[in-house]
Amino acid sequence: MNPKSQRLIILFFFLTLLGLSTFLVLKSLEDNIVYFYSPTDINKKILSNEIDLSKRIRIGGLVKENSILKEGKKISFKIHDGIDEILVIYNGILPDLFREEQGIVALGKIENKNFSAIEILAKHDENYMPKEVSDMLKKNGKWKGKLN
Amino acid sequence: MINYLANPNRFLNFIKPIEFSIGVFSFLFIFIGLYLSLFNSPEDYQQGDTVRIMYIHVPFAWFASFLYLSISIASIFFLIWRHPFADIIARSVAPLGLIFSILTILTGSLWGKPMWGTWWVWDARLTSMLILCIFYFAYIGISNAFPRKIDGSKPAAILAIVGMVNLPIIKFSVDWWNTLHQPASIIRFDGPSINQEMLLPLVIMLLGFLFMSIFIILINIKTNLIYKKYQSEILKLG
């Protein structure tokens, strides 16, 4: 075998092993790499006691319609992922994009099965269009409340 | 074709007549693209005017990744076929890629503050982009770390190939894990989810960035070739 094809084979094996080990590392760290849990994940974790209630976590989902309640500075609303939902209580400044059916990510702790948030970030989805188009879609009933 | 152009002198003769027009193209495309994206494209239904950051953020991010891919491919050619010109190409691409990756993070940060409510989060997409930026730094550092530059070529090439595993992670991070960053809008199974009026300026900007990258990399290649010649002349003089 000439040295060139020898080097090629070594490189090929090297890349395969590298890819495989990266995959295994990412797979085992999955719980740390996810930026937030969905309400379904979190309720499952509460039921199976998989979660440290004293630790701060992030949850994400869509703000449920007609669930936003404001009392002075305190605000509460539900977020859902189409399957499950959880009540979020928050005391602070909301991002501009915050509204019904908008994706958000909240940082905080689980308290009495509710989520007490200390920070709320807005998520926007992958759809880009002018306002006229989105209005038209809504009017024609073709608008889907997209789940991020 | 590749074999023919792998000779530096033939390569220089080949690019001489087209170099200027590549520069003109890059200027034209970016000029038209910027005009369209800043003055002649609609506001987004949810992001308003802030969406205009996309027209530079996306090209920066794409080319930061593409240029890294081209460094890794050139490094594979260098390691296996030991062709010195492949090393010169990889070295000429790296600084531009580093600048693009830094600007991706900066423009993303400026976009994140008004939209998400934060400059930075440690989600998978943002973190993997930061890792790309660090790989660029490491590549440039290692390839220039030795008194004789050529001694750094081999370790740098190995590093470039190792960093290649990060590229699919950047691309698919938004699908594999929950992230604050949005999922893909352009390259996806069911076609782009960007309205045509907004896609057009973005595509023009991407073409402009393609020509601009080629133009700048050609200048770097010429500089590096001249530097190499100069070094060998000095050696001859002793």
Image (cartoon, rainbow, N blue to C red):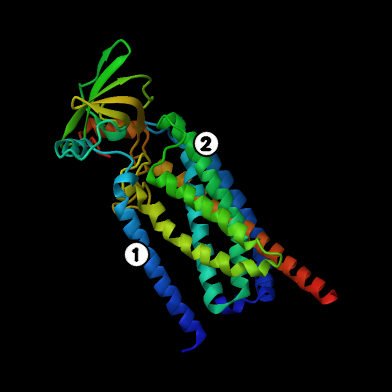
Residue picked out by circle 1: A20
Q: Is residue B207 above or below residue B76?
A: above
Q: Quadrant of the C terminus of chain A?
A: top left
Q: Amino acid at mark 2?
A: Leu
* Chain letter behind tag 2: B
Question: Is A135 situated left or right of B94 in this image?
Answer: left
Question: Is B195 situated left or right of B17 in this image?
Answer: left
Residue picked out by circle 2: B38
* Chain letter behind tag 1: A
Total numbered badges shown on the rendered structure: 2
Residue closest to the eye, B194 or A84: A84
Quadrant assignment, res B138? bottom right
Check chain identity for marks 1 and 2: say if they share one.
no
Q: Residues within 10 Å of mark 1 (few under 14, many from 20)?
A: few
Query: Tag on residue B231?
Result: none
Question: Is B55 situated left or right of B226 in this image?
Answer: left
Residue visible at 30% across and 53% down? A28
Q: Is residue B216 above or below residue B227?
A: above
Which residue is at the far bottom?
A1
